Image (cartoon, rainbow, N blue to C red):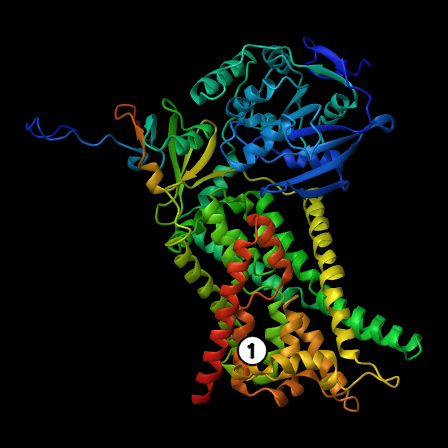
Amino acid sequence: MQLSGNKNEPETLPASLMDLRRGDAAVLSDIDLPAEDARRLMELGFLPGARVVAGHSAPGGDPRVFQVDGSEIAVRRETARRLKIHQKGRVPRKA
Amino acid sequence: MSACGDCAGCGPAAVATFPSAAVKAVAVIGPPNSGKTTLFNRLTGLRQKVANFPGVTVEQHTGIAELAAGQSVELIDLPGVYSLSPHSEDEQVAYDVLTGRRTDTPKPEAVLLVLDSTNLRRHLMLAAPILALGLPTLIILNMADDLRNRGGTLDTKALSNELGAPVALISARQDEGIEQVREFLAGAMALPTPRSLPVLHDIPKCREWAGEVGSQADYRAPIAPKWTRRLDRVMLHPWVGPLIFAFVVILVFQSIFSYVTPLMDGVKWLFDVSGNWIATTLPPSLLRSLLVDGVWRGVGSVIVFLPQVLLLFLFIGILEDSGYLARAALIADRTMARFGLQGKSFIPLLSAYACAVPAILSTRTIENKRDRTATILIAPFMTCAARFPVYTLIIAAFLPNRQLLGFLSVRTVAMIGLYALGFVVAVLTARVLKSSILKSGRTPFVLEMPAYRWPTVQSLGLRLFDRSKVFLRRAGTVILLVTVLLWMAAHVPYSHGHPPAIRDSLAGTLGRTIEPVIRPLGFDWKIGIGIITSFAARETIIATLGAIYGMDHPDATSMDLQSALRHDLTPGAAVALLIFFAFAMQCVSTIAVVRRETGGWKWPLAQFAYMSSLAYGGAFLAAHLMRFV
């Protein structure tokens, strides 16, 4: 996303799992959470570099299920927002 | 023993034999949802016991696995963990047991590591810290049937080579390949050959290692579970999902409160018939009175609930084993979050409608300690099965069976109102707790969605067996003791071969002593005795009142409990009594289990004080407000 010419403007926030719609895939870039919480998520497969696909969600969109490393893990919106993804790696849903 | 030849991957490892000591201990460990417990049940059958690790709230199952040739092995079922780095209580316990640091458990001589073969790469991460312990280890790849059906493959021999430990591909649910596990346990054991393992605390490195090992073993991951995806499209549909959820909850309720009635009547009938038989067989004596009025009536009034409790556990078992429970927790999460709780609190709170004791035990699935404590503290507000007969009795005594709006009876509305009252007070309490003393940090809510599976009869049967044991033990100990004590209190002082009038007995004296305290609520000394005994277990009040009124009017035995209550209570006092029962923590079993699960007296005492004052205050208000109605 290109912002208008002003260079002093902070860049757009890096995208997170929150920005994925159902069926979208993305590659995780980093986990912006305290070490202890990040560890729990990493054990479940949310490792930087992992491919994550957004799945179903509870009514109202929170929490949402993500397919990662062969399992389906539900996390709340507030956590999904902390899981940053590579902007370029974002692949829209196939077909 | 050449048994090892059959086992898929013993080849490269050195074979060591078990020291032929008495009973060998073997630990069973694996990540959650790997089918660890199913395997444990397969190997041990009914020969297992549940114990708690003292000081921590982790449950430990141990069982005896019978092997061929009369050998047996003690299996220790450890909590499901993703890693061995001791960060959580579960992991700490698993680590301590495996390294022999716990004095209450023998140091295991071998390990069964159970992994889900359909998600091998991620689950293999746990193999690194386990193999690093250097104990003889069998790597069990469970759910072979799922792997096969979904087109996944792997080379167990290559995997065994790569890990330096024997590997067995099994399906515990289908009883497939279990003999490999038995052979491993029977004696010929392969020690792991040391391999280069990754740095254990570096998760990305561990995952990389696991991925590489998987590739070396030609692991082809199975395709996504087709049926799970299909079912989730319905179960987690934006509006069909919540409808199914509501349907499931209503079905559970309808079953435990309505469909089960004939069964409960059957049990009651059995107790009545057998009680009468004892009464007619024995000559009139003190012993007969103790047996019939004390023991039989007291214990019978509790065992009547067994069908209800079992049915509830059957439902929870089916929901849990099928995988729907995780979806229910997902759907409930947002609503629970409003009260400061989370989706995983939903099931314990639902279970609390049957009994707070199993509900509190089931809070163990909540990893967040504060959420767990909050759930434990509010669970006893849910209308448990023991309150139900008390409500039924009082409502039937004071409300007409009149129809309201054509289809609902006044009694049903009153009953629903009482259920709602308990729920509302529970969530308000949760809100207060979670915004004050139990405020959580931002520990993320994480919930793994397992694939849907058919529950098996064996696993459900074992669960029911386990629960009925717990329930009957309660009826056989606490409640039996209370009814016998009450009977004795009603017969002291015994003079001239006759028990005293109930008013002058020890029980009556106790009731009259506390009468000034409960008078403002509109209760007399008889209700007072009932309340005292109901602190052992709520439903005891019925047996107590039955005994008291029976003794008080020896010539009017036909006078039933309902009219006796109408005679002694004003409508205001009846409402006060209902409110009192809705709020008070009258259950020693609950107090005991809260103490055990929170690891001390602090929480149960605070909870008891809070609930008792709420009960007294609420009943007082109700009694006084009712005067204006």
Which quadrant holds the C terminus of chain B?
A: bottom left
Tell me what residue is drawn at x 75 percent, y 60 percent. B477
Return the residue nearer the eye: B74 or B433. Answer: B433
Q: Provide residue B435's location: percent of width, then percent of height.
A: 37, 54
Direction from residue B301 to residue A22 in the image, left or right: left
Return the residue nearer the eye: B238 or B313. Answer: B313
Q: Provide residue B503's location: percent of width, then percent of height.
A: 71, 86
Q: Is residue B557 visible?
A: yes
Residue B333's place in the image compared with B477, above or below, is above
Return the residue nearer the eye: B524 or B59. Answer: B524
Direction from residue A55 to residue B15 in the image, left or right: right
Residue B483's place in the image compared with A39, above or below, is below
Give the residue number, with chain letter if any, for mark 1.
B577
Q: Chain of mark 1?
A: B
Q: Provide residue B184's location: percent of width, then percent of height.
A: 74, 21
User: How many labels, in total?
Assistant: 1
Tell me what residue is drawn at x 34 percent, y 26 percent. A28
Residue B447's place in the image compared with A38, above or below, is below
